[in-house]
Image: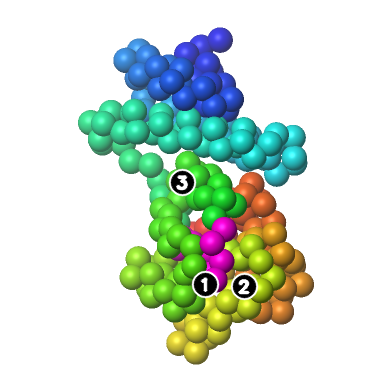
Amino acid sequence: MSTLESLVEAVQIGEEAEAKRLARQAVDGGVPPNQIIEELTVGMRVVGDRFAAMEIFLVELLVAAQAMQSVMKEIEPDLKRSSTTIEKKGTIVIGTVKGDMHEIGKNIVISLLEVQGFEVHDLGVNVDALDFVRKAEAVNADIIGISALMTTTMPFQKDVIDILNAKGMRDKYHVILGGAPVTLEWVKKVGADSWGENAGKSVQILEKVMQERRK
């Protein structure tokens, strides 16, 4: 098994220290940093797909994402020296709606989006509807991700869409909803664009969205 293959495996199983060591070994051995990122991106996609298929547990997804982020930090100086940049797939503003303090699911999505090349602006939890729109305008976002983990806070997802409609800005953003109580029926009812049923599917959906926007 090559160093690069061992690195991908270490990231997938969440061996953070080993992944950083192998990343350094790979770079020092002449492997281009962009090639490392490409291979790890594919490896993380496999992890996301396995989580979506319920073949692995949440903790396994989280430790893999953490290992990937550690490798990214390790090779960041090498990327800069080689003038290699990661292709940005799109910009997303994401947060959990007002009155809702849940963020585990949101953070998993963020981790997967970041390692797949998205620029993510995390608003955190208990976010006012207008703040989603203001931030999206400020960073020229492509996507707005709105999470709600309780049926009592779901209506605040609709508030964000209502504000976008009132401002005549609805068509500017792809709006994806997420959270345990969210359903496809709810997405259609409030006029959102898609439903992030789980972290893996959210990334798949948004990658396709940005591929279509580039055409």
Relative height, residue 93 to residue 82 (above, below): below
Question: Which residue is identified by label 2?
Answer: 153
Callout 3: 10 Å neighbours few (<14), some, many (20+)? some
Look at label 1 and name its amino acid. Lys
Quarter of the image that includes the N terminus: top right
Callout 1: 10 Å neighbours few (<14), some, many (20+)? some
Marks 2 and 3, how far apart at CA: 26 Å
Q: State yes or no: discs 1 and 2 in contact (Cβ < 8 Å).
A: yes
Marks 3 and 1, how far apart at CA: 24 Å
Relative height, residue 199 to residue 140 (above, below): above
Image position of 48 (left or right of 97)? right
Of labels 3 and 1, earlier in sequence is 1
Q: Position of residue 211 (x, y in %)?
A: 54, 55
Question: Considering the numbered disc 2 on the image, is that residue within a helix, a strand or a loop?
Answer: loop
- Can the viewer see residue 168? no
Instruction: Specify the segment rendered in magenta.
Output: 92-102
Question: Which residue is identified by label 3?
Answer: 114
Residue 141 is one of the magenta-drawn residues: no
